[in-house]
Image (cartoon, grey):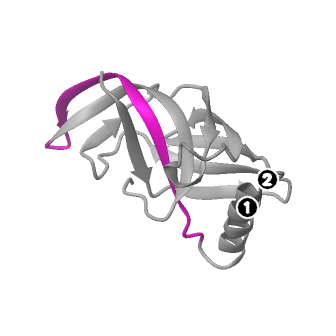
């Protein structure tokens, strides 16, 4: 259905421990995002992906991710490879963010659309994302999703 797409989500980190294991919300189902897309339940399903810093596909992956849908949230259960200096830096930044007020870190994911269609949602013309293949998730400076 097309090339690689990057969906920058506001998202949030739900948990992270000292070993690099954590959970992040990377998407919300059934809402119109800033790209006028509505991701439908089942679009993600369960799949695995890499974790890279800020969509830098030339960078060695800093972790692995298991993606799953739970209610209206799409969750990324990740494990960071803390033997890699960049992963340690991101881990430290994420831990600091969580420990100091409301976390501000945002998330994004790179994916290929495998099935989509046009339609109306809450009176707006939207693209319905029905099935996605996620290649990576990234902690980013600014997300655009809901």
Marker count (numbered): 2
Query: In the image, is 70 to the left or to the right of 19?
Result: left
Disc 1 marks which residue?
A: 91
- Looking at the picture, how far across and down is residue 109, in whole percent? 48, 43
Disc 2 marks which residue?
A: 20
SS at mark 2? loop
- Looking at the picture, how far across and down is residue 45, in whole percent? 53, 25
Q: Earlier in the sequence, mark 2 or mark 1?
A: 2
Crowding around mark 1 (Cα neighbors within 10 Å: few <14, some 14 to 19, many 20+) is: many
Q: CA distance from mark 2 to mark 1?
A: 7 Å
* Extreme residue toward the front, this view: 58
Crowding around mark 2 (Cα neighbors within 10 Å: few <14, some 14 to 19, many 20+) is: many
Identify the magenta region: 103-124
- Looking at the picture, how far across and down is residue 91, in whole percent? 73, 61
**Above or below, 130 relative to 31:** above
Assess whether mark 1 and mark 2 are in contact (beta carbons under 8 angstroms).
yes
């Amino acid at each position: 259905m097309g090339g690689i797409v990057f969906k920058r989500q506001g998202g949030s980190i739900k948990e992270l421990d000292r070993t690099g294991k954590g959970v992040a919300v990377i998407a919300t189902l059934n809402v119109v995002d800033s790209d006028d897309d509505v991701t439908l339940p089942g679009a993600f399903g369960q799949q695995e992906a890499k974790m890279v810093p800020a969509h830098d596909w030339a960078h060695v992956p800093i972790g692995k991710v298991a993606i799953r849908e739970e209610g209206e949230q799409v969750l990324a259960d990740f494990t960071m490879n803390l033997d890699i200096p960049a992963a340690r830096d991101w881990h430290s930044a994420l831990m600091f963010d969580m420990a100091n007020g409301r976390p501000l870190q945002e998330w994004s994911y790179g994916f290929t659309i495998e099935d989509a269609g046009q339609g109306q949602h809450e009176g707006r013309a939207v693209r319905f994302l029905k099935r996605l293949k996620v290649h990576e998730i990234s902690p980013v400076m600014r997300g655009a999703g809901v």
